[in-house]
Protein backbone atom coordinates (compact mmCIF):
# COMPACT_ATOMS: atom_id res chain seq x y z
CA UNK A 1 0.00 0.00 0.00
CA UNK A 2 1.38 3.41 -0.95
CA UNK A 3 1.23 6.34 1.41
CA UNK A 4 0.74 9.94 0.36
CA UNK A 5 3.57 12.41 1.14
CA UNK A 6 4.65 11.98 4.75
CA UNK A 7 3.38 13.82 7.75
CA UNK A 8 6.94 15.01 8.09
CA UNK A 9 7.71 16.33 4.63
CA UNK A 10 9.32 18.96 6.76
CA UNK A 11 11.21 22.06 5.97
CA UNK A 12 14.36 22.09 8.06
CA UNK A 13 16.22 25.16 6.94
CA UNK A 14 18.46 25.59 9.93
CA UNK A 15 21.99 27.09 9.39
CA UNK A 16 23.77 29.92 11.14
CA UNK A 17 22.58 32.95 9.11
CA UNK A 18 22.82 35.53 11.82
CA UNK A 19 20.01 38.03 11.47
CA UNK A 20 18.95 37.23 7.92
CA UNK A 21 15.54 38.84 7.65
CA UNK A 22 12.51 36.76 6.70
CA UNK A 23 9.88 38.95 5.02
CA UNK A 24 6.48 37.20 5.02
CA UNK A 25 3.83 37.87 2.44
CA UNK A 26 1.36 39.32 5.00
CA UNK A 27 -1.52 41.66 4.44
CA UNK A 28 -1.10 45.41 4.12
CA UNK A 29 -3.88 46.16 6.63
CA UNK A 30 -5.78 44.68 9.55
CA UNK A 31 -7.65 41.42 9.05
CA UNK A 32 -10.28 39.57 11.07
CA UNK A 33 -9.69 35.85 11.60
CA UNK A 34 -12.79 33.72 12.24
CA UNK A 35 -14.18 30.26 11.51
CA UNK A 36 -17.83 30.70 12.54
CA UNK A 37 -20.69 31.28 10.12
CA UNK A 38 -21.94 34.24 12.19
CA UNK A 39 -25.48 32.95 12.75
CA UNK A 40 -25.80 32.53 16.51
CA UNK A 41 -27.14 29.20 17.72
CA UNK A 42 -27.31 27.90 21.28
CA UNK A 43 -25.06 28.53 24.24
CA UNK A 44 -22.06 26.25 24.07
CA UNK A 45 -21.17 24.23 27.15
CA UNK A 46 -21.02 24.21 30.94
CA UNK A 47 -17.23 23.81 30.79
CA UNK A 48 -15.35 26.68 32.40
CA UNK A 49 -12.85 27.17 29.55
CA UNK A 50 -13.91 27.45 25.90
CA UNK A 51 -11.94 28.89 23.04
CA UNK A 52 -10.86 28.96 19.43
CA UNK A 53 -7.57 27.86 17.86
CA UNK A 54 -6.52 30.54 15.36
CA UNK A 55 -3.95 30.30 12.57
CA UNK A 56 -2.34 33.27 10.84
CA UNK A 57 -2.26 33.32 7.02
CA UNK A 58 0.30 31.03 5.37
CA UNK A 59 3.88 32.33 5.49
CA UNK A 60 3.02 34.65 8.39
CA UNK A 61 5.15 33.76 11.38
CA UNK A 62 3.90 36.50 13.72
CA UNK A 63 1.46 39.41 13.64
CA UNK A 64 0.14 41.96 16.14
CA UNK A 65 -3.10 41.10 17.88
CA UNK A 66 -5.36 44.17 17.80
CA UNK A 67 -8.91 43.23 18.80
CA UNK A 68 -10.99 40.33 20.09
CA UNK A 69 -14.72 39.95 19.58
CA UNK A 70 -17.15 37.28 20.71
CA UNK A 71 -20.88 36.62 20.95
CA UNK A 72 -22.12 35.86 24.45
CA UNK A 73 -25.33 34.49 25.94
CA UNK A 74 -25.95 36.46 29.09
CA UNK A 75 -28.65 37.92 31.31
CA UNK A 76 -27.49 41.35 32.41
CA UNK A 77 -23.72 41.44 32.74
CA UNK A 78 -21.48 38.40 33.13
CA UNK A 79 -17.82 38.34 34.20
CA UNK A 80 -15.39 36.44 31.99
CA UNK A 81 -11.60 36.12 31.90
CA UNK A 82 -9.96 36.17 28.48
CA UNK A 83 -6.79 34.15 27.93
CA UNK A 84 -4.45 34.41 24.95
CA UNK A 85 -2.21 31.33 24.79
CA UNK A 86 0.15 29.45 22.53
CA UNK A 87 -0.83 26.37 20.52
CA UNK A 88 -0.62 24.20 23.63
CA UNK A 89 -3.55 26.27 25.05
CA UNK A 90 -1.71 26.83 28.34
CA UNK A 91 1.40 28.91 27.53
CA UNK A 92 0.36 32.45 28.50
CA UNK A 93 1.17 35.02 25.82
CA UNK A 94 -0.16 38.03 27.74
CA UNK A 95 -1.78 38.65 31.14
CA UNK A 96 -5.41 37.43 31.41
CA UNK A 97 -8.05 40.09 30.88
CA UNK A 98 -10.97 40.36 33.30
CA UNK A 99 -13.98 41.58 31.35
CA UNK A 100 -17.72 42.04 31.95
CA UNK A 101 -19.59 40.60 28.98
CA UNK A 102 -23.05 41.64 27.87
CA UNK A 103 -25.61 39.77 25.76
CA UNK A 104 -24.69 39.70 22.06
CA UNK A 105 -21.48 40.99 20.55
CA UNK A 106 -18.57 42.11 22.71
CA UNK A 107 -15.43 43.73 21.29
CA UNK A 108 -12.17 44.45 23.13
CA UNK A 109 -9.23 46.50 21.91
CA UNK A 110 -6.03 44.71 22.99
CA UNK A 111 -3.61 46.65 20.80
CA UNK A 112 -2.20 48.39 23.87
CA UNK A 113 -0.57 45.12 24.94
CA UNK A 114 1.64 45.24 21.82
CA UNK A 115 1.37 41.45 21.57
CA UNK A 116 2.79 39.64 18.55
CA UNK A 117 0.90 36.35 18.35
CA UNK A 118 2.62 33.29 16.84
CA UNK A 119 1.24 31.54 13.78
CA UNK A 120 -1.06 29.37 15.93
CA UNK A 121 -2.66 30.75 19.08
CA UNK A 122 -5.80 30.42 21.19
CA UNK A 123 -8.38 32.95 22.36
CA UNK A 124 -10.06 31.34 25.38
CA UNK A 125 -13.04 32.56 27.41
CA UNK A 126 -13.14 31.46 31.04
CA UNK A 127 -16.62 31.72 32.56
CA UNK A 128 -16.74 33.36 35.98
CA UNK A 129 -20.37 32.67 36.76
CA UNK A 130 -23.50 32.78 34.62
CA UNK A 131 -23.59 33.17 30.86
CA UNK A 132 -21.88 31.26 28.08
CA UNK A 133 -20.09 31.70 24.77
CA UNK A 134 -22.33 30.96 21.78
CA UNK A 135 -21.97 28.38 19.01
CA UNK A 136 -22.89 29.12 15.42
CA UNK A 137 -25.45 27.12 13.42
CA UNK A 138 -22.99 25.89 10.79
CA UNK A 139 -21.93 22.29 10.29
CA UNK A 140 -18.17 22.92 10.11
CA UNK A 141 -16.16 22.30 13.25
CA UNK A 142 -12.62 21.59 14.34
CA UNK A 143 -11.38 24.95 15.63
CA UNK A 144 -13.31 25.24 18.89
CA UNK A 145 -12.39 23.41 22.09
CA UNK A 146 -13.40 23.19 25.74
CA UNK A 147 -11.91 22.01 29.01
CA UNK A 148 -12.12 22.36 32.78
CA UNK A 149 -8.60 23.84 32.81
CA UNK A 150 -6.37 25.57 30.28
CA UNK A 151 -4.20 22.47 30.03
CA UNK A 152 -7.23 20.28 29.25
CA UNK A 153 -8.57 22.45 26.42
CA UNK A 154 -8.46 19.56 23.96
CA UNK A 155 -12.11 18.46 23.82
CA UNK A 156 -13.59 19.55 20.46
CA UNK A 157 -16.94 21.29 20.32
CA UNK A 158 -19.53 20.08 17.80
CA UNK A 159 -19.84 23.52 16.20
CA UNK A 160 -17.80 26.70 16.00
CA UNK A 161 -17.72 29.25 18.78
CA UNK A 162 -18.41 32.79 17.62
CA UNK A 163 -15.05 34.16 18.70
CA UNK A 164 -12.89 36.32 16.41
CA UNK A 165 -9.44 37.92 16.42
CA UNK A 166 -8.24 40.95 14.48
CA UNK A 167 -4.58 40.98 13.49
CA UNK A 168 -2.40 43.67 11.99
CA UNK A 169 0.14 43.35 9.15
CA UNK A 170 2.65 40.51 9.48
CA UNK A 171 6.09 41.39 10.82
CA UNK A 172 9.65 40.58 9.77
CA UNK A 173 11.29 37.86 11.86
CA UNK A 174 15.08 37.25 11.90
CA UNK A 175 16.07 33.83 10.55
CA UNK A 176 18.69 32.20 12.77
CA UNK A 177 19.31 28.70 11.45
CA UNK A 178 18.56 26.82 8.24
CA UNK A 179 19.11 23.23 7.06
CA UNK A 180 18.43 21.02 4.06
CA UNK A 181 17.37 17.63 5.38
CA UNK A 182 17.30 14.01 4.21
CA UNK A 183 14.78 11.87 6.10
CA UNK A 184 14.15 8.14 6.42
CA UNK A 185 10.70 7.42 7.86
CA UNK A 186 8.76 4.35 8.95
CA UNK A 187 5.03 4.30 9.69
CA UNK A 188 3.46 1.40 11.56
CA UNK A 189 -0.33 0.95 11.70
CA UNK A 190 -1.88 -1.56 14.08
CA UNK A 191 -5.65 -1.86 13.64
CA UNK A 192 -7.49 -4.06 16.11
CA UNK A 193 -8.40 -7.40 14.60
CA UNK A 194 -6.04 -6.99 11.65
CA UNK A 195 -2.42 -7.70 10.86
CA UNK A 196 -0.04 -4.76 11.49
CA UNK A 197 1.16 -2.86 8.42
CA UNK A 198 4.41 -1.00 7.91
CA UNK A 199 5.40 1.64 5.35
CA UNK A 200 8.87 3.02 4.70
CA UNK A 201 10.01 5.98 2.65
CA UNK A 202 13.01 8.24 2.09
CA UNK A 203 12.64 11.91 1.16
CA UNK A 204 14.24 15.33 1.41
CA UNK A 205 12.90 18.61 2.73
CA UNK A 206 13.74 21.95 4.31
CA UNK A 207 13.11 23.80 7.58
CA UNK A 208 13.56 27.35 8.89
CA UNK A 209 14.20 28.35 12.52
CA UNK A 210 13.65 31.93 13.62
CA UNK A 211 15.54 33.88 16.25
CA UNK A 212 12.42 34.30 18.41
CA UNK A 213 12.14 30.54 19.07
CA UNK A 214 9.56 29.74 16.38
CA UNK A 215 9.96 27.66 13.23
CA UNK A 216 8.16 27.11 9.93
CA UNK A 217 8.17 24.18 7.52
CA UNK A 218 7.82 24.23 3.77
CA UNK A 219 4.30 22.81 4.11
CA UNK A 220 3.42 25.60 6.56
CA UNK A 221 3.74 23.65 9.77
CA UNK A 222 4.64 25.94 12.64
CA UNK A 223 5.92 25.40 16.14
CA UNK A 224 8.56 26.38 18.66
CA UNK A 225 12.11 25.22 19.31
CA UNK A 226 14.77 25.52 21.96
CA UNK A 227 18.44 24.60 22.18
CA UNK A 228 20.26 22.88 25.04
CA UNK A 229 23.95 22.80 24.22
CA UNK A 230 24.20 21.06 20.87
CA UNK A 231 20.71 19.56 21.15
CA UNK A 232 17.73 21.18 19.41
CA UNK A 233 14.24 20.26 20.57
CA UNK A 234 11.14 20.96 18.45
CA UNK A 235 7.54 21.34 19.61
CA UNK A 236 4.61 20.86 17.23
CA UNK A 237 0.94 21.67 17.53
CA UNK A 238 -0.80 18.27 17.87
CA UNK A 239 -3.82 19.62 15.96
CA UNK A 240 -1.60 20.30 12.93
CA UNK A 241 -0.37 16.72 13.10
CA UNK A 242 -3.94 15.42 13.43
CA UNK A 243 -4.87 17.23 10.21
CA UNK A 244 -1.83 15.87 8.38
CA UNK A 245 -2.53 12.34 9.53
CA UNK A 246 -6.08 12.60 8.22
CA UNK A 247 -4.75 13.74 4.84
CA UNK A 248 -1.71 11.46 4.54
CA UNK A 249 -2.92 8.11 5.81
CA UNK A 250 -4.05 5.61 3.09
CA UNK A 251 -7.19 4.96 5.14
CA UNK A 252 -10.34 6.93 5.81
CA UNK A 253 -10.14 7.84 9.48
CA UNK A 254 -11.94 9.82 12.15
CA UNK A 255 -11.39 10.70 15.80
CA UNK A 256 -7.65 10.98 15.21
CA UNK A 257 -5.76 11.89 18.38
CA UNK A 258 -2.06 12.52 18.87
CA UNK A 259 -0.86 11.22 22.23
CA UNK A 260 2.80 12.23 22.02
CA UNK A 261 5.31 13.92 19.72
CA UNK A 262 9.06 13.80 20.30
CA UNK A 263 11.47 15.51 17.91
CA UNK A 264 15.09 16.49 18.45
CA UNK A 265 18.49 16.67 16.81
CA UNK A 266 22.10 17.36 17.75
CA UNK A 267 24.48 19.70 15.91
CA UNK A 268 27.96 18.43 15.05
CA UNK A 269 31.24 20.34 14.78
CA UNK A 270 30.80 20.61 11.01
CA UNK A 271 27.40 22.24 11.66
CA UNK A 272 25.42 19.29 10.31
CA UNK A 273 22.66 17.88 12.48
CA UNK A 274 21.42 14.35 13.08
CA UNK A 275 18.21 13.55 14.87
CA UNK A 276 15.01 11.56 15.09
CA UNK A 277 11.30 11.95 15.74
CA UNK A 278 8.35 9.85 16.83
CA UNK A 279 4.61 10.45 16.70
CA UNK A 280 2.17 8.29 18.67
CA UNK A 281 -1.45 8.54 17.55
CA UNK A 282 -4.75 6.71 17.57
CA UNK A 283 -7.72 6.72 15.20
CA UNK A 284 -10.93 5.03 14.13
CA UNK A 285 -10.59 3.35 10.71
CA UNK A 286 -13.81 3.33 8.64
CA UNK A 287 -12.73 0.56 6.29
CA UNK A 288 -12.16 -1.84 9.17
CA UNK A 289 -14.82 -0.50 11.53
CA UNK A 290 -12.20 -0.61 14.23
CA UNK A 291 -9.81 1.54 16.22
CA UNK A 292 -6.07 1.37 15.89
CA UNK A 293 -2.72 2.90 16.72
CA UNK A 294 -0.26 4.76 14.50
CA UNK A 295 3.45 5.09 15.18
CA UNK A 296 5.56 7.27 12.90
CA UNK A 297 9.30 7.24 13.42
CA UNK A 298 11.95 9.00 11.42
CA UNK A 299 15.67 9.73 11.34
CA UNK A 300 17.16 12.74 9.60
CA UNK A 301 20.50 14.18 8.56
CA UNK A 302 20.54 17.96 8.08
CA UNK A 303 23.15 20.09 6.31
CA UNK A 304 23.27 23.87 6.75
CA UNK A 305 21.87 25.76 3.77
CA UNK A 306 24.37 28.54 3.18
Image (spheres, rainbow, N blue to C red):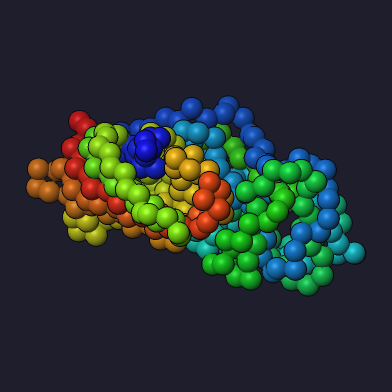
Q: Looking at the image, which residue is at 35% across and 42% down? A: 8
Residue 231 seen: yes
User: Residue 293: image x %, image y %?
Assistant: 43, 58
Compared with residue 8, is residue 44 higher up or lower down, i.e. above or below?
Answer: below
Count of marks overlaid on the render: 0
Residue that protrudes farthest toward the left in the picture: 269
Query: Is residue 184 shown left or right of residue 188?
Result: left
Q: Nearer the viewer, residue 189 or 54?
A: 189
Q: Quadrant of the N terminus?
A: top left
User: Residue 114: image x %, image y %?
Assistant: 56, 48
Q: Nearer the viewer, residue 250 or 227?
A: 250
Compared with residue 195, is residue 119 higher up or lower down, i.e. above or below?
Answer: above
Q: Looking at the image, which residue is at 52% across and 30% down? A: 26
Query: Is residue 27 shown left or right of residue 100?
Result: left
Residue 97 seen: no
Q: Nearer the viewer, residue 241 or 166?
A: 241
User: Residue 73: image x %, image y %?
Assistant: 84, 59
Q: Looking at the image, which residue is at 27% across and 35% down? A: 203
User: Residue 206: image x %, image y %?
Assistant: 30, 35
Query: Is residue 148 shown left or right of residue 75?
Result: left
Q: Quadrant of the C terminus?
A: top left
Residue that protrudes farthest toward the right in the picture: 76
Amino acid sequence: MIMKPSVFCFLLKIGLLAMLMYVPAGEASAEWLFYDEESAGNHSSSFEFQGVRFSLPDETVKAPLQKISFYYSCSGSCPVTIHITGFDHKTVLMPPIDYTASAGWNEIDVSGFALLVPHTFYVILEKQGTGSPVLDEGMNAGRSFKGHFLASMNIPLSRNLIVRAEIGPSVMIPVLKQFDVDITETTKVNIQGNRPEKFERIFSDKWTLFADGTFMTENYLYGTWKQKGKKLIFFYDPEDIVNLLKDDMPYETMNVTVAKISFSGAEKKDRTMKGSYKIYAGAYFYEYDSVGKILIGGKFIAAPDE
